[in-house]
Image (cartoon, rainbow, N blue to C red):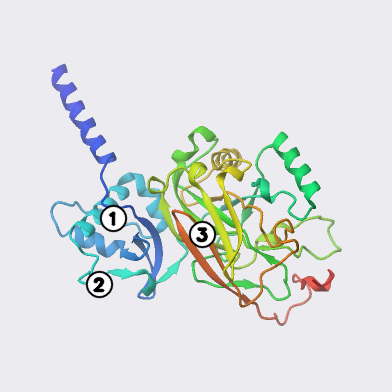
Amino acid sequence: MRKIKLVVLTAVLSVTAAVSAQDIAEPFKVGTFEINGAPEVGIVLRDSIIIELDAANATLEQSVSYPSIPVPANMLELIERYDYGVKRRLYEIVNHHVGSDMLGDDRPSYVHNVDDVRTLPPIMYPGKILNAAVNFYSHIDESGNEEERRESDRLRREERGVPYLFLKPSRGAVVGNGAEIVIPYGRNRTDWEVELGAVIGKTAKYTSANDAEAHIFGYMVTMDISDRGGRPPGGARFTSDWFVGKGHDSFAPQGPWIVPKEFYGNPMEILRQSLSVGGEQMQEATAGDMIHSLWELVEYASSIITLHPGDVINNGTSGGTGMGTAVRGAQRFLQPGETVSATIDGIGTITLPVVGGEKPKGLTGAELPPVDSYRDPL
């Protein structure tokens, strides 16, 4: 009897291993797209083809070979359930559509060219967004002279300390590829930052950096658009205001989609992030410039607050921001009419036009005023 039980257990383990090692016809990404006027989760192939998840799953389940499973209603649910049946179903959908040549001219109506649909933020919306401040050596003291930058770099390398994270607003700030970055009226020192967005896939609390990668679902391109104008003088004696600097509408672009981690690799080995304004490259960096690794950011964040599936940790940005003088010799900020593009190799590019916000009316004076009302004009 014991021998029979051992044989059965071995067979079960073999089936489990086969499921976990399921082959995929080609790698995919996942995103959220506006289709027929509503947000739909889609599978992205070749950065050019979108397969509607719900419709593709319904087609697949017409075969008795595929059991019926509930389709995730949105990206948050997909992330939560990815390792609990959804991953296997996505693999099956991709394999079926690629293997059955359903992506060509005779494709089903639920298969679209990416240019024919509107790309929305992949996650609508993250529960929380945590950004790493000054986490690249090239971003340290960007406005200082060469000697000051060299000394600041030396001191930070001698004592890294723990990471510095701040909260970025989610709904309202998060926008997708192609949406507008709106410079609020009078806030004429608006800056750019390209960052890697790591999407949490499994709940993390006091998670060691050694185990952090297991808690990641995937990666996307993000920007941390920043208002460098500061707060007006008077009132409370605060020296900085992170809400003013980071919290405006449209200041957290994300996308264009999420690459599941099995199709990206280790960002601490392969990361390359870059940003251009109007076609002029402003930033470029690799993981070697990071002060704290992505895994250390997860450990630090989870030592303060529990990370949940769909939360986002941004890795920080490199030198080349608009406020810095190290790269271009002078400060340079975003202007209405310009276009910003951020790219991470192996993930994709998000491109957003910049527009100026209208002058608000009917306020009482408690609003954030134009920068030039309390600082010397640029």
- Residue 124 makes an appearance in the image: no
Whole-angstrom CA distance, mark 1 to mark 2, is 21 Å
Could you tell whether 1 is left or right of 372 in the image? left
What residue is rendered at 36% in x and 49% in y?
Answer: 81
Q: Which mark is residue 343?
A: 3
What residue is rendered at 27% in x and 49% in y?
Answer: 24
- Asked whether the residues under the numbered discs 2 and 3 touch, taking CB atoms below 8 Å apart as contact, a structural biologist would say no
User: Which of the two discs, 2 and 3, sits closer to the camera?
Assistant: 3
SS label for mark 3? strand
Could you tell whether 150 is left or right of 114 in the image? right
Per the image, the residue denoted by label 1 is: 70
Whole-angstrom CA distance, mark 2 to mark 3, is 30 Å
- Residue 28 makes an appearance in the image: yes
**Quarter of the image with the N terminus in it:** top left
SS label for mark 2? loop
Tag 1 or tag 3, which sits nearer the N-term? 1
What residue is rendered at 52% in x and 51% in y?
Answer: 272
* Residue 9, quarter of the rendered image: top left
Give the amino acid at mark 3. Thr
User: Which of the two discs, 3 and 1, sits closer to the camera?
Assistant: 3
Give the amino acid at mark 1. Pro
Q: Which mark is residue 109?
A: 2
Could you tell whether 239 is left or right of 140 in the image? right
